[in-house]
Amino acid sequence: MARAHGARAQMALAFETVYGTPPASGYRLMPFARTTLGAEQPLLNSELLGYGRDPLAPIKDAVTADGEVVVPIDVEAFGFWLKAAFGAPTTTGTTPKTHTFQSGNWTLPSMAIEVAMPEVPRFAMYAGCVMDQLSWQMNRSGLLTATARLIAQGEAIAAATAAGTPTALGLQRFGHFNGVVKRNGSALGNVVSAEITYANGLDRIETIRNDGKIEGADPGMAALTGRIEVRFADSALVTQAIDGTPCELEFAYSLGANASFTFTAHAVYLPVPRIEIPGPQGIQATFDWQAAKATSPARMCTAVLVNTVTGY
């Protein structure tokens, strides 16, 4: 009897033309570290009386399909998650290609994601997957990954794959060592760590259906928040926080001229932090920042991925 192992699991992804309808072809094999993507259907206890002390059979409740996927921030595959978060990019150039993703799109593409456990066999197809949140952290060391939080319409289990033979992408990962943080175009020194979270504020459309699925997930007000922790060496950030003026923060990774990822928050507002002295060690300050729509460019953020992929 075969037993499922994560080492043999695979994930295939394709964008849908019609929400909730997985395409017949065009799937890509996606690298991932772990996932909680799945569907659950709780049971409702019977409230009826008059049948003795033993309860009657429970009733099935509505289906909820969602979860997170932890993926590497890499040169090629990460572009599909950026497209899910921001919409289709504008692609320019010959070699390399520059894919520019912008915030503010009114519609977001939906995806069909198949999670395969071939030894059981179990092939779970999640249709109508829409990106609710994309987040990652910057540190000095460790593995660089991002967490994609998804809302799906439903789950379909089969004993054979519906994704065919997915096309594999070249895997070239960025690392924390390749990262840099800039403020208004200049490198920001003394940064210990940083967090970035982009949220689409999805609104589940929970209509009455006989299959228990949702009707869709519409984007609401977007939000871009994060945190930077810095060694307290000067008062530049504190002064900006007190003045209430915005700055531009750029989080970038580069593996050369043909492979880079740059995420820019165009208007970042900093809170006035509490400066604590915890002991004899170095003093650090933490800023829980928020981004807003800038005047120029007239959007909140821009993500630029440079690689040799023709398009997303």
Image (cartoon, rainbow, N blue to C red):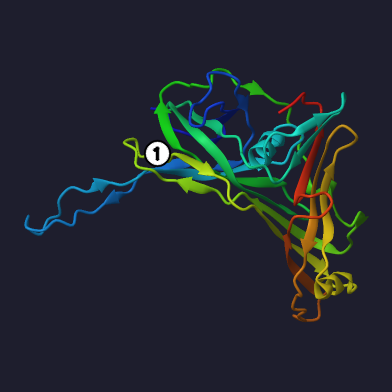
Which of 220/127 is in front?
Answer: 220
**What is the x, y in percent for residue 231?**
84, 69
Which of 55/14 is in front?
Answer: 14
The 10 Å Cα crowd at callout 1, few under 14, some 14 to 19, many 20 or more, is many
- Residue indicated by mark 1: 213
In the depicted structure, whether residue 81 falls above or below residue 311? below
Residue 65 left/right relative to 163: left
**What is the x, y in percent for residue 207?**
39, 43
Total marks shown come to: 1
**What is the x, y in percent for residue 150?**
55, 43
**Residue 9 in sight from this viewpoint:** no
Residue 296 left/right relative to 19: right
SS of the residue under disc 1: loop
Residue 289 left/right relative to 42: right
Which quadrant does the C terminus fall into? Answer: top right
Quadrant in the rendering for residue 282: bottom right
Which of 177/229 is in front?
Answer: 229
The residue shown at (71%, 35%) is 79
The residue shown at (33%, 48%) is 42
In the depicted structure, whether residue 38 falls above or below residue 9? below
**Residue 94 in sight from this viewpoint:** yes
Which quadrant does the N terminus fall into? Answer: top left
**What is the x, y in percent for residue 121?**
43, 26
Quadrant in the rendering for residue 169: top right
Q: Amino acid at mark 1?
A: Lys
Residue 46 left/right relative to 266: left
